[in-house]
Image (cartoon, rainbow, N blue to C red):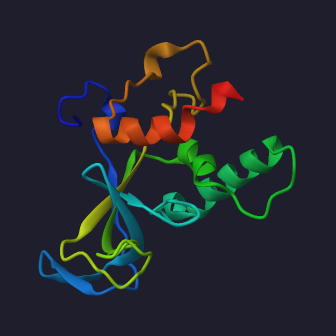
Amino acid sequence: FVRNAPAEDLQQWDVLLVGGKGRAIDLGGSKILRAQRGVGEGDGIYTISGSKRRVAGSGDVAILMSAERKDQAIASFRALETEPTKGVPDTAYVPFLERPLLILYPIEANLLGGPDGRPQRDFPLEETLVGVLVAVPERIGPEGRRPPSDDRSADVTYMLNAPAQRLWAAEYGDEDDD
């Protein structure tokens, strides 16, 4: 995708490998501690479980940002928020990234339902799962400003595979019914 993308601002990416507190794996001669996550299994796919069902840690998108850009993102978020919040969501940092960002999370997965079907966290998977976060900032023009909202030149079409579509449909599909 990236190699064939005509957009100049998609040609260089920042790539970040985030570890955790799990058992180490050998990756290219380096020992990487995996993130530990509980996972559910169904329909031939694994899903991250828990109250937030996410792999990324809060602020992961901002890890590689300069202090100046991070401050700009926080100020922009605070200016737009309607009710005060403690933290700043990762989505607030994305428009201020200098380049697209790919974050990889090697995961030490523990199935939440063991062989007897009861929830348990001591049923580790042998293979390492990998969580992926992709953050693509809006294009910035030569004057350092965002394009106007009617500028469609920065539009990107995303494709989701069938398992992702089923998961998203289950999570977001009922909002119109309320």
Residue at x 32%, y 36% (from the top left corner): 10
- Whole-percent x, y for residue 46 in the image: 32, 58
In the picture, measured across the screen, residue 61 lies left or right of residue 71, that is left
Residue at x 45%, y 23% (from the top left corner): 154
Q: Is residue 116 placed above or below 95 in the rendered structure?
A: below
Give the residue furthest to the front.
116
Residue at x 38%, y 76% (from the top left corner): 35
Closer to us: 134 or 128: 128
Q: Is residue 138 placed above or below 128 in the rendered structure?
A: above
Give the residue furthest to the right.
83
From this viewpoint, is residue 136 visible? no
Q: Is residue 17 placed above or below 65 in the rendered structure?
A: below
From this viewpoint, is residue 171 visible? yes
Assign the N terminus to one quadrant of the image.
Answer: top left
Give the residue furthest to the left.
29
Residue at x 33%, y 34% (from the top left corner): 160
- Whole-percent x, y for residue 115 in the image: 29, 75
Instruction: Give the tally of numbered discs.
Output: 0
- Whole-percent x, y for residue 140 in the image: 51, 32
- Whole-percent x, y for residue 95 in the image: 56, 41
Closer to us: 25 or 7: 25
Closer to us: 16 or 122: 122
Assign the C terminus to one quadrant of the image.
Answer: top right
In the picture, measured across the screen, residue 178 lies left or right of residue 107, that is right
In the picture, measured across the screen, residue 169 lies left or right of residue 144, that is left
